Amino acid sequence: MYPRVSLALRRARGQAVAVEVLAQRVGLGPERVAEAVAALVAGGFAIESHPLQGVRLLDPPPGLLADELASDLDAARVGHAVRCLDEASSTNDLAWQAADQGRETADGLAIFAEYQTAGRGRRGNRWLAPPHSSLLCSVVLWVPHGPALAGVLTRAVSLAAAEAIEAETDLQVGIRWPNDLVIEDRKVGGVLVEARAGRGEEAVAVLGIGINVTQRAEAFPADIRPGVLSLAMAGASPDRTLLGRRLLERLDAVCGQMGQQTGAEAVCQAVARRSRTLGRHITVSDGPDQVTGEVVALDPDYGLLLRLETGAIRRFPPMTTHVVSQGGG
């Protein structure tokens, strides 16, 4: 496998690249580039070679490849090791199994699956995605323990995913509290963060992300179809491998910021700017009761502050609160 060559061809986005230019980009001689192209073709890449125009990627293999996702990542921790599976029950479950093996091997591990038989979202909801249509990923990280850790990390991971999508498309992505990625109020992705207390002041977290990439409308059940979207349905056609790499890099950068007060404040402000919940009238359930009010702020632990009809301000924690309905702002 020659991931530098395949990634350079992916980044060309269907355009031909002269062999000499390609060789310069990947730091190999022309003869080695020719060897790499031949090896990629043998590995399932459809590549066109022209003596004058150069080399053009016609069609990559349908599945994600660990070598491509991990090669030369601009990341300190996230993605130091990558696993890609055709099928898994849940990437979060596999990430927890890896975490049980210890920090030395698991910290920063990213697990991708093409299809999940028991993928889950918040409050036990199922994540539905045909094979090769989404980006389904879970990352293991050891982080400083703190109050409402899962809620705080959900904010950071949502921001990283939104930034990754925008970096690979021309789309604008919002964040709908607590864990939805939205384009024009339709859900294009979601985040599921799970955390467990570790030793001392540390905790272990699994950051689960799902992004709809290539699905058409008919891939979604009819009852949820009006409220969901894929990047393809929104008019974009990102390369899933390049999007996956960007996601790992943004996760590394944003989660790294959360360890510093100024960085954490910057993340909070960035999430607030993308919020599709602030300023809206919503109805939430927290236990048996339903409450309606205007969202006036997101608190430091990523809960909701609602102004009720009485004028009182009430806080709703992220781990126990469910949004029943959401109106306009």
Image: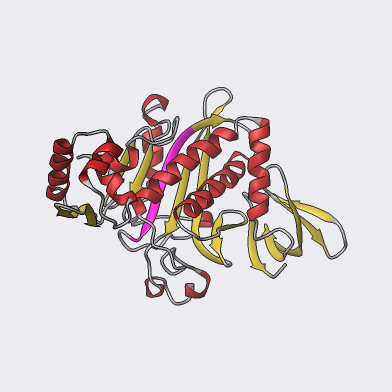
Of residue 243 and residue 188, the one placed in the foreground of this image is 243
Q: Quadrant of the N terminus?
A: top left
Q: Which span is picked out in magenta?
A: 133-141
Q: Residue at x 43, y 42 (%)?
A: 248
Residue 43, x across and y down, in percent? 15, 48
Furthest residue toward bottom: 222
Does residue 25 appear in this view? yes
Q: Quarter of the image for the C terminus: give it.
A: bottom right
Residue 146 in the image, given as x and y percentages of width and height? 63, 33
Residue shown at the point (58%, 34%) measured from the top left = 257
Whether residue 221 sits left or right of residue 183 in the image: it is left
Of 34 and 294, nearer the camera is 34
Q: Is residue 299 left or right of residue 10?
A: right
- Say above or below: 84 vs 310: above
- The answer to which image quadrant residue 2 occupies is top left
Q: Position of residue 107 (x, y in %)?
A: 42, 30
Which residue lies at the image location 14% right of the left edge and 52% below the top edge? 51
Q: Is residue 185 above or below residue 23?
A: below
Query: Left or right: where does residue 261 sit relative to residue 169?
Result: right
Percent of width and height locating residue 30: 17, 38
Q: Overall secondary structure of the magenta stretch?
A: strand
68 or 208: nearer the eye?
Answer: 68
Q: Is residue 323 magenta?
A: no
State the scheme by which the image is colored: secondary structure
Residue drawn where x is 72% and y is 46% of the image: 299
Is residue 88 visible from the viewing direction of this image? no
Q: Going by the image, does 87 lie left or right of 32?
A: right
Image height check: is 134 above or below 207?
below
Residue lying furthest front in this view? Answer: 52
Number of callouts: 0
Vertical order, 258 against 129 (above or below) = above
